[in-house]
Image (cartoon, rainbow, N blue to C red):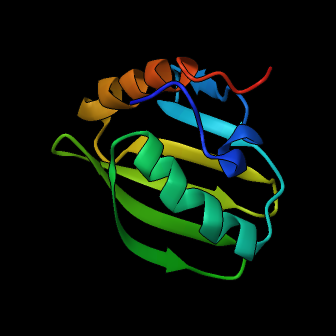
Amino acid sequence: MGSTLAPELLQLGQGHWNAETGHLSWQIPLDDDQLLAVVPKLALALDAQLGQHQWGADRHQWQLRFEGTELLLQFESLCDSLWIQAQSPADADVAAYLAQLWKGYDCGQ
């Protein structure tokens, strides 16, 4: 994991780790085109593999795998929220680790 980000990822900023919910989240308004440009770059920046994408009227969800751990990457357009969470509560430490990795990036904030 390097220290520079793709320009599209700089808009995410530092993100917020919530230990209670086990979510690494960002508040950011994205339209569908912007979201579909950001998500693969976010997965790449985190050295994670992007999997199946499901979506509905106002929500997107991707399977995300990091070093064998299954995670979810979700976006809710009604609240402009993008977040990563472990699929299993037992793997919340992996999401916490990704939050620490993300803090290593200089997001210009």
User: Whole-percent x and y of residue 70?
Assistant: 26, 50
Report whether 47 appears left or right of 2: left
Between 7 and 63, the residue placed more toward the observer is: 7
Between 36 and 76, the residue placed more toward the observer is: 36
User: Whole-percent x and y of residue 1?
Assistant: 38, 30
Residue that appears at 49% across and 60% down: 40
Report whether 22 appears left or right of 49: right
In the displayed structure, would residue 11 be above or below residue 77?
above
Residue that appears at 44% across and 74% down: 53
Residue at the extreme bottom of the image, as rendered:
57
Quadrant housing the C terminus = top right
User: Whole-percent x and y of residue 11?
Assistant: 77, 42
Residue that appears at 52% across and 17% down: 104
Residue at the extreme left of the image, as rendered:
68
Residue that appears at 44% across and 22% down: 101
In the displayed structure, would residue 14 be above or below residue 30?
above
User: Whole-percent x and y of residue 28?
Assistant: 80, 48
Quarter of the image for residue 89 reads: top left
In the displayed structure, would residue 50 be above or below residue 103?
below
Between 5 and 36, the residue placed more toward the observer is: 5
In the displayed structure, would residue 7 be above or below residue 101?
below
Report whether 92 appears left or right of 54: left
Quarter of the image for residue 33 reads: bottom right
Between 74 and 89, the residue placed more toward the observer is: 74
Quarter of the image for residue 59 reads: bottom right
